[in-house]
Image: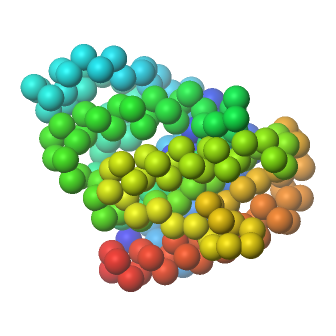
Amino acid sequence: MKVFGICGSPRNSTTYYVLKEALNKLEDNRFETYLFSCSGKNIGPCMHCDYCLEHKKCINNDDMLEVYEKLQQCDGLILATPVQSGGISSNLSAIMDRTRALEAVDYNILRGKIGMSIAVGGDRTGGQDFAHLKNITYFMIHGIIPVSGGPFGSNLGASFWSRDSLEDIKKDDYGFESLNRTLVEFEKFLKKYID
């Protein structure tokens, strides 16, 4: 089974590290993974021009083309975002908005895939829940089944406190516990509904 991880951070630091750790754990359990980092990529915003409705593709010819391909191929999707202004990154938001072009081709193209959320905040309560809710809303809109680690620590997904430092996020045992719990459920859902 294929899992596609999108790192919505404009730099490869804490969010990238956590997503890479998640994908490594999945690879250890025989999942095929692919990581797309927004760092250094050119992904413009959706202009809502409706070009995709007529031509069945986006008018923008940028790095989103790679994302379209991987979204179609994957069985599971992990959205990882740094918390910015109490929500998701603008990079990840652009990817979400641009998914419209895929659904112009097939309205159900993402339906039935399994999704999980990772949110990394500089503060322990820096907006991780709001970031998760945005990711989960995206999943629901597109028919992706959202999975969390359950109550008591990973209610909406894996939440991290980075203290704005790569070294500090590596010490966030509580965050990694939430990641491990969420990954267990994510794998269960993939095996139950996709396999």
- Could you tell me which residue is drawn at 78 percent across and 61 percent down? 175
Question: Is 104 on the left-hand or right-hand side of 128?
Answer: left
Residue 12's image quarter?
top right
How far across and how far down the image is residue 55, in percent? 11, 26
> In the rendered image, which quarter contains the C terminus?
bottom left
The N terminus sits in image quarter: bottom left
- The residue at 60%/37% (across/down) is 88
Q: Is residue 136 visible?
A: yes
Q: Position of residue 161 (x, y in %)?
A: 82, 50
Q: Is residue 81 above or below residue 144?
A: above
Percent x, y for residue 173?
A: 85, 65
Q: Tell me what residue is drawn at x 35 percent, y 31 percent.
A: 98
Which residue: 25% across, 40% down? 102
Give left or right: position of 64 versus 57.
Answer: right
Say above or below: 44 vs 110.
Answer: above
**How many dots with numbers?**
0
Quadrant of residue 46 within the rendered picture: top left
Question: Up-down: is 176 above or below 71?
Answer: below
| 59 or 193: nearer the viewer | 193
Q: How is the image coloured?
A: rainbow
Given residues 127 and 73, the one toward you in this image is: 127
Relative image position of residue 33 (x, y in whole percent): 47, 61
Q: Is residue 12 visible?
A: no
